[in-house]
Image: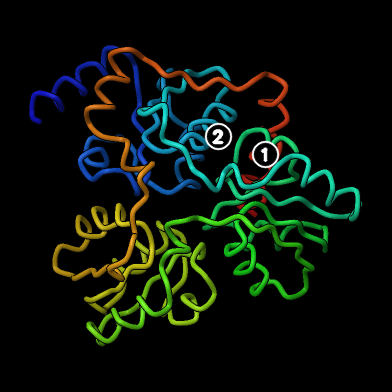
Protein backbone atom coordinates (compact mmCIF):
# COMPACT_ATOMS: atom_id res chain seq x y z
CA UNK A 1 0.00 0.00 0.00
CA UNK A 2 2.73 2.46 1.03
CA UNK A 3 4.75 1.76 -2.13
CA UNK A 4 1.65 2.20 -4.30
CA UNK A 5 0.84 5.58 -2.75
CA UNK A 6 4.45 6.75 -3.19
CA UNK A 7 4.38 5.61 -6.82
CA UNK A 8 1.08 7.43 -7.45
CA UNK A 9 2.44 10.66 -5.96
CA UNK A 10 5.65 10.39 -8.00
CA UNK A 11 3.82 9.77 -11.31
CA UNK A 12 1.34 12.51 -10.53
CA UNK A 13 4.14 15.06 -10.15
CA UNK A 14 6.06 13.86 -13.21
CA UNK A 15 2.97 13.90 -15.44
CA UNK A 16 1.41 17.15 -14.15
CA UNK A 17 -1.80 15.49 -12.93
CA UNK A 18 -4.35 16.72 -10.40
CA UNK A 19 -6.48 14.02 -8.76
CA UNK A 20 -10.15 14.82 -8.15
CA UNK A 21 -12.23 12.35 -6.12
CA UNK A 22 -15.92 12.13 -5.27
CA UNK A 23 -17.02 11.45 -1.69
CA UNK A 24 -18.51 8.09 -2.72
CA UNK A 25 -15.25 6.44 -3.88
CA UNK A 26 -13.12 4.29 -1.59
CA UNK A 27 -11.65 6.11 1.43
CA UNK A 28 -8.09 5.18 0.45
CA UNK A 29 -8.60 7.02 -2.86
CA UNK A 30 -10.10 10.05 -1.14
CA UNK A 31 -7.03 10.13 1.10
CA UNK A 32 -4.56 10.52 -1.78
CA UNK A 33 -6.68 12.92 -3.87
CA UNK A 34 -5.82 16.61 -4.20
CA UNK A 35 -9.48 17.60 -4.04
CA UNK A 36 -12.41 15.65 -2.64
CA UNK A 37 -15.99 16.80 -2.94
CA UNK A 38 -19.46 16.45 -4.41
CA UNK A 39 -20.35 17.07 -8.05
CA UNK A 40 -20.80 20.85 -7.69
CA UNK A 41 -17.52 21.39 -5.87
CA UNK A 42 -15.55 19.23 -8.29
CA UNK A 43 -17.16 20.91 -11.33
CA UNK A 44 -15.89 24.27 -10.01
CA UNK A 45 -12.44 22.94 -9.06
CA UNK A 46 -12.01 21.47 -12.54
CA UNK A 47 -12.14 25.01 -13.98
CA UNK A 48 -9.57 26.38 -11.53
CA UNK A 49 -6.73 23.85 -11.37
CA UNK A 50 -3.42 24.73 -13.03
CA UNK A 51 -2.43 21.17 -14.02
CA UNK A 52 -2.80 20.16 -17.66
CA UNK A 53 -4.08 16.70 -16.78
CA UNK A 54 -7.07 15.78 -14.58
CA UNK A 55 -7.47 12.27 -13.17
CA UNK A 56 -11.11 11.88 -12.16
CA UNK A 57 -12.00 9.37 -9.46
CA UNK A 58 -15.74 9.05 -9.90
CA UNK A 59 -18.23 7.98 -12.56
CA UNK A 60 -18.24 8.82 -16.26
CA UNK A 61 -20.62 11.81 -16.28
CA UNK A 62 -18.28 13.61 -13.84
CA UNK A 63 -15.30 13.15 -16.12
CA UNK A 64 -17.39 14.37 -19.07
CA UNK A 65 -18.36 17.51 -17.14
CA UNK A 66 -14.72 18.21 -16.32
CA UNK A 67 -13.79 17.80 -20.00
CA UNK A 68 -16.68 20.00 -21.18
CA UNK A 69 -15.60 22.78 -18.83
CA UNK A 70 -11.90 22.30 -19.69
CA UNK A 71 -11.76 21.30 -23.37
CA UNK A 72 -8.06 22.15 -23.63
CA UNK A 73 -7.13 19.79 -20.77
CA UNK A 74 -6.73 16.03 -20.74
CA UNK A 75 -9.23 14.27 -18.50
CA UNK A 76 -8.54 10.65 -17.57
CA UNK A 77 -10.97 8.40 -15.68
CA UNK A 78 -9.59 6.20 -12.92
CA UNK A 79 -11.88 3.40 -14.14
CA UNK A 80 -13.34 3.14 -17.63
CA UNK A 81 -16.36 1.15 -16.48
CA UNK A 82 -17.47 3.29 -13.52
CA UNK A 83 -20.78 4.66 -14.78
CA UNK A 84 -24.02 6.02 -13.31
CA UNK A 85 -27.21 4.15 -14.35
CA UNK A 86 -29.35 7.23 -13.69
CA UNK A 87 -27.35 9.21 -16.25
CA UNK A 88 -28.85 6.98 -18.96
CA UNK A 89 -32.47 7.07 -17.77
CA UNK A 90 -33.55 9.93 -20.02
CA UNK A 91 -33.25 10.24 -23.81
CA UNK A 92 -32.87 13.16 -26.19
CA UNK A 93 -36.17 12.06 -27.82
CA UNK A 94 -38.05 12.37 -24.52
CA UNK A 95 -36.75 15.90 -24.04
CA UNK A 96 -37.65 16.85 -27.60
CA UNK A 97 -41.20 15.53 -27.07
CA UNK A 98 -41.70 17.60 -23.90
CA UNK A 99 -40.35 20.70 -25.66
CA UNK A 100 -42.78 20.10 -28.51
CA UNK A 101 -45.72 19.88 -26.10
CA UNK A 102 -44.49 22.75 -23.88
CA UNK A 103 -42.65 25.35 -26.01
CA UNK A 104 -42.10 27.64 -23.00
CA UNK A 105 -40.46 24.96 -20.83
CA UNK A 106 -36.96 25.15 -19.35
CA UNK A 107 -35.18 21.79 -19.40
CA UNK A 108 -33.30 21.50 -16.10
CA UNK A 109 -30.76 18.73 -16.24
CA UNK A 110 -29.28 17.18 -13.10
CA UNK A 111 -25.51 16.98 -13.56
CA UNK A 112 -25.87 13.18 -13.16
CA UNK A 113 -26.52 12.83 -16.89
CA UNK A 114 -24.65 12.19 -20.14
CA UNK A 115 -23.02 14.90 -22.23
CA UNK A 116 -25.67 14.31 -24.93
CA UNK A 117 -28.46 15.13 -22.46
CA UNK A 118 -26.66 18.20 -21.16
CA UNK A 119 -26.28 19.38 -24.76
CA UNK A 120 -30.07 19.58 -25.25
CA UNK A 121 -30.81 21.15 -21.85
CA UNK A 122 -31.16 24.79 -20.78
CA UNK A 123 -29.28 24.56 -17.50
CA UNK A 124 -27.60 21.95 -15.33
CA UNK A 125 -27.97 21.64 -11.56
CA UNK A 126 -26.42 19.67 -8.72
CA UNK A 127 -28.16 18.56 -5.55
CA UNK A 128 -26.53 21.44 -3.66
CA UNK A 129 -27.56 24.23 -6.04
CA UNK A 130 -30.76 22.92 -7.71
CA UNK A 131 -33.22 25.02 -5.67
CA UNK A 132 -31.20 28.22 -6.16
CA UNK A 133 -30.62 27.70 -9.89
CA UNK A 134 -34.26 26.83 -10.69
CA UNK A 135 -35.49 29.75 -8.58
CA UNK A 136 -33.29 32.10 -10.63
CA UNK A 137 -34.66 30.85 -13.97
CA UNK A 138 -37.13 33.19 -15.70
CA UNK A 139 -39.27 30.28 -16.94
CA UNK A 140 -42.23 29.07 -14.87
CA UNK A 141 -42.46 25.64 -16.52
CA UNK A 142 -39.67 23.25 -15.61
CA UNK A 143 -38.91 19.81 -17.05
CA UNK A 144 -36.58 18.24 -14.49
CA UNK A 145 -34.43 15.32 -15.70
CA UNK A 146 -33.50 12.61 -14.98
CA UNK A 147 -34.00 12.23 -11.19
CA UNK A 148 -37.63 12.12 -10.07
CA UNK A 149 -36.90 12.36 -6.34
CA UNK A 150 -34.61 15.38 -6.56
CA UNK A 151 -37.07 17.04 -8.96
CA UNK A 152 -39.92 16.59 -6.48
CA UNK A 153 -37.77 17.87 -3.61
CA UNK A 154 -36.93 21.04 -5.58
CA UNK A 155 -40.59 21.49 -6.60
CA UNK A 156 -41.64 21.47 -2.93
CA UNK A 157 -39.28 24.37 -2.23
CA UNK A 158 -40.55 26.33 -5.26
CA UNK A 159 -44.37 26.11 -5.34
CA UNK A 160 -44.51 29.09 -7.70
CA UNK A 161 -43.01 26.97 -10.50
CA UNK A 162 -44.79 24.29 -12.52
CA UNK A 163 -42.80 21.05 -12.76
CA UNK A 164 -42.91 18.20 -15.25
CA UNK A 165 -41.14 15.22 -13.71
CA UNK A 166 -39.16 12.41 -15.27
CA UNK A 167 -39.02 8.89 -13.82
CA UNK A 168 -35.24 8.46 -13.39
CA UNK A 169 -33.72 7.55 -10.01
CA UNK A 170 -30.53 6.71 -8.13
CA UNK A 171 -30.74 3.02 -7.22
CA UNK A 172 -28.70 3.59 -4.03
CA UNK A 173 -30.91 6.35 -2.64
CA UNK A 174 -34.15 4.75 -3.82
CA UNK A 175 -33.24 1.54 -1.97
CA UNK A 176 -33.13 3.42 1.36
CA UNK A 177 -36.67 2.76 2.56
CA UNK A 178 -38.69 4.51 5.26
CA UNK A 179 -38.91 1.32 7.32
CA UNK A 180 -35.07 1.10 7.32
CA UNK A 181 -34.87 4.67 8.62
CA UNK A 182 -37.51 4.00 11.29
CA UNK A 183 -35.59 0.91 12.47
CA UNK A 184 -32.35 2.92 12.60
CA UNK A 185 -34.13 5.63 14.63
CA UNK A 186 -35.41 3.00 17.07
CA UNK A 187 -31.90 1.63 17.44
CA UNK A 188 -30.38 5.12 17.86
CA UNK A 189 -33.16 7.38 19.19
CA UNK A 190 -30.72 10.18 20.03
CA UNK A 191 -29.34 10.39 16.46
CA UNK A 192 -30.33 13.03 13.89
CA UNK A 193 -31.29 11.79 10.40
CA UNK A 194 -29.33 13.45 7.57
CA UNK A 195 -30.62 12.67 4.08
CA UNK A 196 -29.71 13.24 0.43
CA UNK A 197 -32.57 14.71 -1.70
CA UNK A 198 -32.27 11.80 -4.16
CA UNK A 199 -34.07 9.74 -1.49
CA UNK A 200 -37.81 9.19 -1.69
CA UNK A 201 -40.28 11.63 -0.15
CA UNK A 202 -41.25 9.34 2.76
CA UNK A 203 -37.58 9.10 3.79
CA UNK A 204 -37.15 12.88 3.48
CA UNK A 205 -40.18 13.37 5.77
CA UNK A 206 -38.42 11.34 8.49
CA UNK A 207 -35.28 13.48 8.26
CA UNK A 208 -33.89 16.25 10.44
CA UNK A 209 -31.82 17.68 7.59
CA UNK A 210 -31.87 17.25 3.80
CA UNK A 211 -28.92 18.28 1.65
CA UNK A 212 -26.21 17.34 -0.80
CA UNK A 213 -23.30 15.16 0.27
CA UNK A 214 -21.14 18.17 1.13
CA UNK A 215 -24.03 19.84 2.96
CA UNK A 216 -24.55 16.67 5.03
CA UNK A 217 -20.86 16.72 5.97
CA UNK A 218 -21.00 20.43 6.87
CA UNK A 219 -24.16 19.97 8.92
CA UNK A 220 -22.74 17.06 10.92
CA UNK A 221 -19.45 18.91 11.47
CA UNK A 222 -21.08 22.11 12.73
CA UNK A 223 -23.86 20.44 14.74
CA UNK A 224 -23.67 20.22 18.53
CA UNK A 225 -25.25 16.76 18.19
CA UNK A 226 -22.81 13.86 18.17
CA UNK A 227 -24.84 11.00 16.65
CA UNK A 228 -26.23 10.84 13.13
CA UNK A 229 -28.06 8.41 10.85
CA UNK A 230 -26.77 8.95 7.32
CA UNK A 231 -29.09 8.39 4.33
CA UNK A 232 -26.71 8.48 1.40
CA UNK A 233 -23.92 6.37 -0.11
CA UNK A 234 -21.52 4.83 2.43
CA UNK A 235 -18.42 6.46 0.92
CA UNK A 236 -19.29 9.69 2.73
CA UNK A 237 -18.54 8.02 6.08
CA UNK A 238 -14.80 8.41 5.41
CA UNK A 239 -14.94 12.22 5.31
CA UNK A 240 -17.49 12.38 8.14
CA UNK A 241 -15.19 10.40 10.41
CA UNK A 242 -12.08 12.30 9.30
CA UNK A 243 -13.67 15.61 10.24
CA UNK A 244 -15.53 14.33 13.31
CA UNK A 245 -13.53 11.56 15.02
CA UNK A 246 -15.45 12.05 18.27
CA UNK A 247 -18.91 11.68 16.68
CA UNK A 248 -20.86 8.53 15.76
CA UNK A 249 -22.36 7.86 12.32
CA UNK A 250 -24.81 5.08 11.54
CA UNK A 251 -26.09 3.65 8.28
CA UNK A 252 -29.69 2.55 7.84
CA UNK A 253 -28.29 -0.92 7.31
CA UNK A 254 -29.55 -1.47 3.80
CA UNK A 255 -27.78 -1.27 0.42
CA UNK A 256 -26.13 2.14 0.81
CA UNK A 257 -23.52 1.09 -1.70
CA UNK A 258 -22.77 2.18 -5.27
CA UNK A 259 -20.85 -0.62 -7.02
CA UNK A 260 -19.78 1.75 -9.79
CA UNK A 261 -18.16 4.23 -7.41
CA UNK A 262 -16.42 1.34 -5.65
CA UNK A 263 -14.73 0.32 -8.91
CA UNK A 264 -12.37 3.24 -8.27
CA UNK A 265 -9.51 1.81 -6.20
CA UNK A 266 -5.87 2.77 -5.59
CA UNK A 267 -4.90 0.02 -8.02
CA UNK A 268 -7.07 1.60 -10.74
CA UNK A 269 -5.63 5.05 -9.98
CA UNK A 270 -2.11 3.67 -10.37
CA UNK A 271 -2.96 1.96 -13.69
CA UNK A 272 -4.65 5.09 -15.06
CA UNK A 273 -1.59 7.21 -14.19
CA UNK A 274 0.78 4.68 -15.77
CA UNK A 275 -1.16 4.56 -19.05
CA UNK A 276 -2.79 8.02 -18.90
CA UNK A 277 -5.88 6.18 -20.17
CA UNK A 278 -8.84 6.05 -20.55
CA UNK A 279 -9.17 9.58 -21.91
CA UNK A 280 -12.53 11.27 -21.75
CA UNK A 281 -13.59 12.20 -25.27
CA UNK A 282 -16.65 14.27 -26.11
CA UNK A 283 -17.49 15.11 -29.76
CA UNK A 284 -16.81 18.80 -30.44
CA UNK A 285 -20.43 19.72 -31.28
CA UNK A 286 -21.73 17.98 -28.14
CA UNK A 287 -18.97 19.53 -26.05
CA UNK A 288 -19.81 23.07 -27.19
CA UNK A 289 -23.56 22.59 -26.69
CA UNK A 290 -23.16 20.92 -23.28
CA UNK A 291 -20.82 23.67 -22.04
CA UNK A 292 -23.63 26.25 -22.16
CA UNK A 293 -25.95 24.72 -19.50
CA UNK A 294 -22.97 23.89 -17.27
CA UNK A 295 -21.64 27.46 -17.46
CA UNK A 296 -25.14 28.81 -16.93
CA UNK A 297 -25.38 26.66 -13.80
CA UNK A 298 -22.19 28.22 -12.42
CA UNK A 299 -23.50 31.71 -13.21
CA UNK A 300 -26.98 31.22 -11.69
CA UNK A 301 -25.61 29.44 -8.62
CA UNK A 302 -23.30 32.41 -7.96
CA UNK A 303 -26.17 34.96 -7.92
Q: Label 2 to label 1, Cα distance in Å?
A: 9 Å
> Residue placed at 28% from the left, 79% from the top?
184
Q: What residue does disc 1 label?
A: 118
Frontmost residue, 195 versus 52: 195
Horizontal relation, residue 249 to residue 217: left or right: left
Quarter of the image with the C terminus in it: bottom right
**Helix, strand or loop under label 2:** helix
Task: Bin the neighbour count of mark 2 within 10 Å (Cα to Cα): few under 14, some 14-19, many 20 and up.
Answer: many
The x, y position of residue 72, in whole percent, is 55, 17
In this picture, residue 93 sits left or right of residue 75: right
Q: Earlier in the sequence, mark 2 or mark 1?
A: 2
Residue 228 sits in quarter = bottom left
x and y, in percent, of residue 126 in the image: 56, 52
Label 1 SS: helix
Residue 32, position as x, y percentages in the image: 23, 35
Residue drawn at x 60%, y 56% as measured from the top left: 147
Please tell me how crowded label 1 is: few (under 14), some (14-19), or many (20+) other residues with Cα within 10 Å: many
Q: Nearer the viewer, residue 39 or 230?
A: 230
Q: Which residue is depicted at the point 75% across and 65% down?
A: 163
Horizontal placement of 30 versus 200: left or right? left
Q: Nearer the viewer, residue 302 or 201?
A: 201
From the top left corner, tell me how far across and down residue 130 is, in percent. Answer: 61, 58
Give the label on residue 288, or none. Answer: none
Residue most extreme to the left: 2
Q: Is residue 259 above or below residue 201?
A: above
Image quarter of the N terminus: top left
Number of marks: 2
Circles 2 and 1: CB atoms closer than 8 Å:
yes
Where 135 falls versus 184 (above or below)? above
What residue is shown with label 2? 65
- Write the residue at 67% across / 46% down: 90
What colour scheme was applied to this rendering of the protein?
rainbow
Amino acid sequence: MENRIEKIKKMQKEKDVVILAHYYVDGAVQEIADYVGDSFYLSKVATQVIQQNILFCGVSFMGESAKILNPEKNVVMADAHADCPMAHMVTVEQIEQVRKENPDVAVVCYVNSTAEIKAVSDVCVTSSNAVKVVKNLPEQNIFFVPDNNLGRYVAKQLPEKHFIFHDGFCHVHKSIHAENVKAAKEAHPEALVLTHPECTEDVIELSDFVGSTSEIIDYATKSVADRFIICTEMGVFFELQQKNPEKKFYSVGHRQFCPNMKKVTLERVEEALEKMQPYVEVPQDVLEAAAKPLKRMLELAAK
